[in-house]
Image (cartoon, coloured by chain):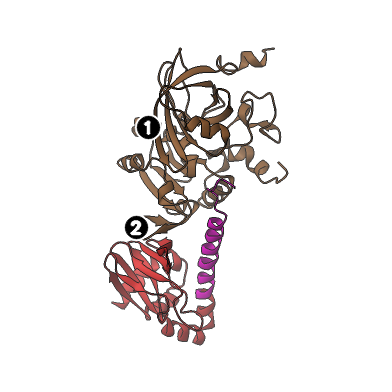
């Protein structure tokens, strides 16, 4: 089972180029999960003790905004990373995540990974660099949306 | 030496009458008009535009979203009502007569792209000038390899041609994303340049056709370059403050080029550096 997860992760773009021994260490904190269409993956305020690599399906990340209801901020597809609140205290989710279709993902135990990163700084630096790249990309795309480029400029 | 009038299409200077045959509202502020020539009409190549004259109100440049292959066929225009002239045009009732000057400008290099892959990237009403590329690709599907349409809109309610997008999905890879949505929307939420990374094409053999707001074009070009698509194979349709449409007034000048005369379609290699100059 562990071997299989290693192989699955090696195919995920997020882990591309990562040494095999690091992937093995990370895989030790992971397990495969599935969510049915409409199922909540986590909610705002939940303990953020996990993150996910989406392998199949679509996840909506959003929030409940009274009185407008549930709004979707972005959608994530196969290969995308879901969840980074596990990285820093207070380890609480800031948004809701919901499966828009059948979702298959690999779920990682945040506490387990934090311990391994603390014990192995090279692994920690590599993993944090990869997370930083994802965060920067998401921030850039979010900034682009803030420009409201399809508005009529008035 | 030929005069400017001799270099332009016969209908470039004097509006030809076209009768509004059909008007369809696409979104809250966008309409698609089908106009039939009262006289002979004209053929339009994919990417060309016309100057549309609402008599007594004014004239605006509009890209042709449904180009006639030969004179006498109707011209289809998709227009966003954002100013006095476009509001007057979109408010016209079937039977009304509008003036069209054209066809004007150059066209998308659809023939040049044959034999390779195609990726169409559109944002907002930028899908209208690219619709002819999609129709051409579908009509000659066997001449192209992988063919994709990536489209971004503000919200699900702002998506142009939703029925057609679904239909195009039968023989093209169509991906639609919106900037914002509520839970009634089960599609993608994000910006259209994000889709480029996941799209199936051969970077060395793809031709990219891009149209939308300039900021969206900028980020799309960056995403295409990251995939290894050369600037010479990235084509953009630009929009500036066009007035005369025939290269005389200079309002649409972008450095050494006049968009109405030399464009509106350029390769990234031709205009990429110019688009980075804020003063232009």
The image shows residue A53, relative to residue B116, as above or below, that is below
Which SS class for mark 2? Answer: loop
**What colour do you see for chain A?**
red
**Disc 2 chain ID:** B
Examine the image and state in which quarter residue B25 appears: top left
Using the image, tell me which numbered label, if any, was put on residue B257. none
Q: Position of residue B59 (x, y in %)?
A: 58, 27
Examine the image and state in which quarter residue B132 appears: top left
For mark 2, does the 10 Å Cα neighbourhood hold few (<14), some (14 to 19), or many (20 or more) residues? few
Q: Position of residue B27 (x, y in %)?
A: 42, 42
Q: Which residue is mark 2?
A: B184
Numbered label tally: 2
- Find out whether residue A97 is within the magenta segment: no
Question: Is there any visible trace of residue B207 in the rendered image?
Answer: no
Left or right: B190 as drawn, with respect to B256 = left
Question: Is there any visible trace of residue A66 in the rendered image?
Answer: yes
The image shows residue B32, relative to residue B176, as above or below, that is above
User: What secondary structure is the stretch in magenta mostly built from?
Assistant: helix
- In space, the residues marked 1 and 2 are separated at their CA atoms by 38 Å
Q: Which chain is brown?
A: B
For marks 1 and 2 on the same chain, the one whose residue lies earlier in the sequence? 1
Q: Position of residue B103 (x, y in %)?
A: 53, 22
The magenta segment: A127-154
Examine the image and state in which quarter residue B144 appears: top left
Residue extending farthest right: B279
For mark 1, does the 10 Å Cα neighbourhood hold few (<14), some (14 to 19), or many (20 or more) residues? some
Left or right: A78 as drawn, with respect to B40 = left
**Quadrant of the snapshot with the N terminus of chain B:** top right
Q: Which residue is mark 1?
A: B143
Please tell me which residue lies in front, A133 or B94.
B94
Residue at 47 percent across and 70 percent down: it is A18
């Amino acid at each position: 089972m562990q071997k299989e997860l290693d192989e699955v992760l090696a195919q995920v773009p997020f882990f591309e180029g990562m040494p095999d021994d690091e992937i093995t260490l990370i895989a030790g904190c992971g397990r495969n999960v599935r969510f049915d269409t409409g199922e909540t993956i986590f909610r705002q305020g939940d303990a953020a003790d996990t993150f996910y690599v989406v392998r199949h399906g679509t996840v909506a990340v959003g929030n409940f905004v009274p009185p407008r209801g549930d709004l979707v901020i972005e959608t994530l597809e196969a290969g995308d990373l879901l969840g980074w609140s596990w990285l820093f205290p207070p380890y609480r989710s800031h948004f809701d995540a919901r499966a828009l279709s059948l979702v298959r993902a690999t779920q990682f135990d945040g506490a387990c990974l934090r311990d391994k990163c603390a014990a192995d700084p090279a692994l920690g630096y590599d993993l944090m660099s990869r997370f930083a790249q994802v965060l920067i990309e998401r921030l850039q795309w979010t900034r682009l949306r803030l420009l409201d480029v399809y508005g009529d400029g008035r | 030496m030929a005069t400017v009038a001799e270099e332009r299409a016969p209908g470039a200077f004097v509006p030809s009458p076209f009768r509004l045959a059909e008007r369809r509202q696409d979104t809250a502020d966008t309409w698609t008009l089908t106009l039939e020539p009262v006289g002979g009409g004209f053929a339009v190549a994919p990417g060309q535009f016309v100057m549309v004259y609402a008599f007594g109100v004014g004239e605006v440049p509009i890209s042709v979203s449904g180009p006639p292959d030969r004179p006498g066929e109707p011209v289809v225009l998709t227009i966003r009502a954002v100013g006095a002239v476009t509001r007057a045009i979109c408010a016209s009732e079937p039977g009304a007569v509008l003036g069209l000057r054209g066809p004007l400008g150059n066209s998308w290099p659809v023939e040049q792209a044959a034999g390779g892959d195609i990726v169409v990237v559109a944002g907002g009403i930028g899908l209208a000038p690219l619709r002819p590329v999609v129709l051409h690709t579908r009509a000659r599907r066997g001449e192209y390899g992988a063919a994709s349409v990536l489209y971004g809109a503000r919200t699900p309610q702002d998506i142009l041609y939703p029925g057609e997008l679904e239909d195009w999905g039968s023989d093209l890879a169509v991906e639609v994303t919106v900037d914002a949505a509520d839970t009634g929307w089960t599609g993608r939420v994000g910006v259209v340049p994000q889709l480029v990374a996941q799209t199936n094409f051969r970077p060395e053999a793809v031709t990219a056709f891009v149209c939308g707001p300039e900021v969206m074009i900028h980020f799309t070009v960056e995403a295409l370059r990251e995939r290894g698509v050369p600037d010479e194979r990235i084509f953009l349709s630009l929009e500036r403050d066009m007035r005369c449409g025939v290269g005389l007034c200079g309002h649409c000048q972008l450095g050494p080029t006049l968009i109405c005369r030399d464009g509106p379609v350029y390769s990234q290699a031709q205009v990429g550096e110019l688009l980075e100059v804020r003063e232009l």
